[in-house]
Structure formats: C-alpha cells, structure tokens
C-alpha cells in the first residue's frame, strides 16, 4: 500500500531497562535522536513522568536541551509538558530559553494530566482537579509566549515555538478554540471507540479557530509501531512495554523494561494476560507490508497530517532497526 507523504516523528519516553542505570537510559535517548535525524524523521519528542521506576525522563526541558545540543536539524519537543504540574510562566521561560539556544527547532507539546498517585500529586502541590484549569493555564502560557501578557517572559519567545495539545478528554475542544495542533492516540481509532474518536476529530476541525500558530487544523496521530521480518518478531519488540503496562495496572508500579526471555518465564495472571493482549492488539506491528497496510488505514481514517511513533523496546538494537525500517517505508531521508 502506498503511504502518504507526510512527516513522521518519534516520541521517546526515556524508558529504563532492567540492569541499566539512569545515565545509560538517557544516553540511549540521545543516541536514538541522532539516528532519527540521520534517517529523516521530522521531530523527536520526550515526555514528562514523575517518580516512575521504569522511566528516566522526568524533566523534559532538560532532556530536550541535551537532545538538541547533540543534533543539528531535527525538531525537538515535549510530548508533553504536563501543564497542571507547572506555573505557566516557568514553562514559558524554559521554552523561550530553549528556542533562544536552538532557534527554529523547538516544539512545545502540552498535556493536562496530573500525577498518577496521591503522593506524587502532593509532591507537585497539585490535586486531581488541577486538570480542570488547563484551558485557563494554556491561555496564560500563550500570552507569555506571544508577548501579550501583563508581564514579558524572559527571554522573549515572540510566538516562535509552536504549541501542540495532547488531546485527551477536553483537549480536542481546547485546542480547536485556541487554534493549536492536536496529538491524538492511534489506538482510539480501532474497535468500539473509533466512532467517538472520529467524531471528536470532526469537532476539532469544524470548530477550529485559526491562530498565529496554525492557519488550519493540524492533526498528529500517535501509535506504537514495530516493523520486523515476521508478525511474531514484531510482536516480541512490543512485549516488554506491554508487560510493564500490565504490571502498572495490576501492581501499581511501572517497572524498567524486561527482556522478552524473562517475560516468557512469568506466570501471568488472567488479567495480566488480557492487558498484554490488549496492548499488543492496539499497536501497529508486522512485516513491512503489513505495517504499511495498517498505517495506511489509520492515516486515511483520521486524515492525519503527521504520524508520531511512540514505540519503546528492551532491545535497543532492535528498536534502532524498526526505526530504520519505518523510515524506509515512508521514504524519509
């Protein structure tokens, strides 16, 4: 199947891996960004997670600076900064500083999630209701970035950094009203929920108000994607993260990624087996031909302007291989 000629980008959550220290995990993120640039990927984003044993990336602004310093052309951004966790002025100052250091290369992806546990929320001085103020916080942040607020954030960004909204819950409506791009999850467009997800995208496009950042709606669809010689081999690439997600749902803690061999020896409960199966089913995986067909259907259904790949694996060499194969499928470079 002929894939559309659209930008393709990577999001790396800075997963820790069993037997690996945090310095190694962060170095792996930077190395992957370098390969992504060589392969022709459009953006390389990092995420924000707090007090998660299996995630080394808790400070996206710091990691973005490290990635941008070790690359030359690829856009570097956050997927995302969780705005309820921060004062909008501080986010504006961090973003503007990055933009001043790396002009024309910085993106600001913004989410409305709060800390997952009461202890984390307490440490962040927030509660569950903090997400309800997202639209107001976003408007304040945009004022600082554009230089239209009551005070001027320093250094001044002047509206140079394009913002993106991670569209969970009310995020789609907020992005449309603010005239911003949205990032939506690919798994929502499969199964019973696909109708609701497509309706939300239709509302976004219908209600979009052009802004200085985006004259028209812009949709990025994200998905876990694994390309290998066989469907079984591609599934193995995704198993480590699927198992970590299952453990987070059943034991309350997302651990470092484990090797596939160790996971095969696990005595999974029925619920864990179901959660792993659901994660694998929601991904796009298989041979190059199978992946091209699956992605073609996803991109056609959503009318996406860009694809954001969110895959992480225990085997970093295998991850580099799937990144290279996907770049080849889209003719990047």
Image: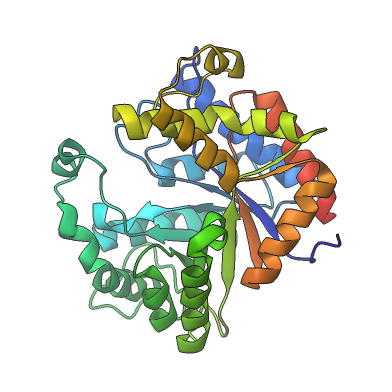
For the question of whether residue 221 can be seen, the reply is yes
Question: Furthest residue to the front?
Answer: 270
Q: Quadrant of residue 82?
A: bottom left
Answer with left or right where residue 219 lies relative to residue 232.
Answer: left
Q: Is residue 125 above or below residue 159?
A: above
Please tell me which residue is depicted at 16% across the width and 59% down the height of the picture.
Answer: 129
Please tell me which residue is depicted at 65% across the width and 53% down the height of the picture.
Answer: 9
For the question of whether residue 161 can be seen, the reply is no
Colour logic: rainbow
Q: Whole-percent x and y of residue 177? A: 39, 83
Q: Is residue 209 above or below residue 233?
A: below
Q: Whole-percent x and y of residue 322? A: 74, 37
How many numbered marks appear? 0
Of 24 and 134, the residue lying toward us:
134
Give the quarter of the figure containing the N terminus: bottom right
Q: Is residue 102 above or below residue 239?
A: below
Answer with left or right where residue 310 lies relative to residue 61.
Answer: right
Q: Whole-percent x and y of residue 293? A: 78, 56
Please tell me which residue is depicted at 51% across the width and 42% down the height of the picture.
Answer: 278
Of 131 and 34, the residue lying toward us:
131
Of 197 and 94, the residue lying toward us:
197
Q: Is residue 14 above or below residue 83?
A: above
Answer with left or right where residue 254 lies relative to residue 273.
Answer: left
Q: Whole-percent x and y of residue 218? A: 57, 74
């Amino acid at each position: 199947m002929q894939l559309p000629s659209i930008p393709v980008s990577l999001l790396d959550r800075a997963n820790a891996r069993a037997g690996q220290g945090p310095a190694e995990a962060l170095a792996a993120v930077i190395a992957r960004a370098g390969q992504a640039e060589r392969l022709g990927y459009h953006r390389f984003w990092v995420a924000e997670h707090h007090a998660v044993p299996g995630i080394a990336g808790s400070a996206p602004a710091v990691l973005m600076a490290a990635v941008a310093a070790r690359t030359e052309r690829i856009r570097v951004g956050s997927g995302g900064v969780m705005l309820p966790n921060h004062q909008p002025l501080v986010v504006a100052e961090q973003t503007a500083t990055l933009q001043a250091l790396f002009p024309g290369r910085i993106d600001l992806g913004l989410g409305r999630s709060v800390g997952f546990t009461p202890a984390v929320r307490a440490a962040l001085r927030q509660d569950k209701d903090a997400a309800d103020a997202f639209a107001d916080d976003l408007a304040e942040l945009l004022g600082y970035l554009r230089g239209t607020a009551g005070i001027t954030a320093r250094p001044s960004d002047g509206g140079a950094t394009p913002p993106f909204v991670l569209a969970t819950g009310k995020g789609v409506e907020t992005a449309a009203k603010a005239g911003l791009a949205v990032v939506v999850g690919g798994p929502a467009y499969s199964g019973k929920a696909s109708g609701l997800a497509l309706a939300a995208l239709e509302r976004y496009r219908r209600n979009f108000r052009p802004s200085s950042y985006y004259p028209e709606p812009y949709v990025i669809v994200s998905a876990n994607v694994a390309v290998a010689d066989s469907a079984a081999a591609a599934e193995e690439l995704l198993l480590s993260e699927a198992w970590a997600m299952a453990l987070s749902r059943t034991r309350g803690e997302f651990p470092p990624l484990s090797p596939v061999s160790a996971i095969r020896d696990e005595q999974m409960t029925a619920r864990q087996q179901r959660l792993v199966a659901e994660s694998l089913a929601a991904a796009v995986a298989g041979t190059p031909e199978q992946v091209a067909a699956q992605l073609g259907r996803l991109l056609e259904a959503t009318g996406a302007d860009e694809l954001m790949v969110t895959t992480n694996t225990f085997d970093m060499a295998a991850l580099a291989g799937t990144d290279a194969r996907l770049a080849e499928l889209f003719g990047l470079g």
